[in-house]
Amino acid sequence: MRAGENAVLAGATVGVMGSGTEEYEELASGVGALLARLGVNLLTGAGNGVMRSVSRAFTQAERRRGICIGVVPCFSERERGKPKDGYPNEFVELAIYTHLPYSGEHGTEDLSRNHINVLSSDAIVALPGGLGTASELILANEYKKPAIVYSPDMDVVQRFPQSVPRTATLEGVRKFLETHLGGRASRSNLVSP
């Protein structure tokens, strides 16, 4: 299935959070392909960096179900009807436009789309990122959403809340999702590498 062709909403949604500037291609493409195999929806912040590379991998992988959802911030408080420049990226199949301009160091504030990102996800996988990603993990704790940090280099994720478990492998991500999604993802797909 290619982006937008016969996309079918799945029963579970996994939010993938990470850098808006660096793609972390190897990590993000592995996660995107895994989520496609699991038959879940992918939710991101709809921008560049990790958001773009995980969305690309997800939409280019063979899927029976699951769509790529992007929650789009607005340009500014004054221009709430205009999406932020570069949003959504070309791989987003369902763009959810918001009136919410804040991100980064303001990611936990009420005018940040991060609340929607977290609350709309059944589980969250965080890849390396900055203050915006850290704020999404803070919100995941606040809203009691299961989250895991995925990075072979733990130095780049030191700023993330220490209460969030970490894994250095894609297999660790798969096991986390198996535990937290249960029957909402295909069991046969969950055991595939």
Image (tube, rainbow, N blue to C red):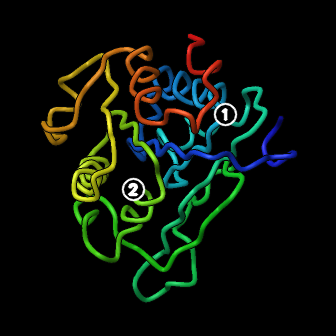
Q: Nearer the viewer, residue 98 or 20?
A: 98
Circle 1 residues within 10 Å: few <14, some 14–19, many ≥20? many
For the residues labelled 2 and 1, the Cα–Cα distance comes to 19 Å
Residue at the image point whose x is 65% and y is 30% from the top: 36
- Residue at left 36%, top 65%? 115
**Does 185 appear above or below 138?**
above
Q: Which residue is mark 2?
A: 118
Query: Measured from the top left, where is residue 77 in percent x and y?
Result: 40, 84
Does residue 99 appear left or right of residue 105 in this picture? Answer: right
Furthest residue toward bottom: 78
Choose between 53 and 134: the one closer to the eye: 134
Secondary structure type for disc 1: loop
Residue at 17%, 24% in the rendered image: 155
Quadrant, the C terminus: top right
* Residue 85 percent location from the top left of the image: 54, 65
Q: Quadrant of the N terminus?
A: top right
Of pointers 2 and 1, the one earlier in the residue sequence:
1
Name the quadrant containing residue 21. top left
Q: x and y percent of residue 35 in the render?
A: 58, 31
Q: Amino acid at mark 2?
A: Val
- Residue found at x 33% / y 42%: 146
Q: As displayed, is residue 188 above or below residue 148? A: above
Q: Is residue 124 above or below residue 118?
A: above
Q: Is residue 109 left or right of residue 15?
A: left
Q: Residue furthest right?
A: 6
**Res. 39 mark:** 1
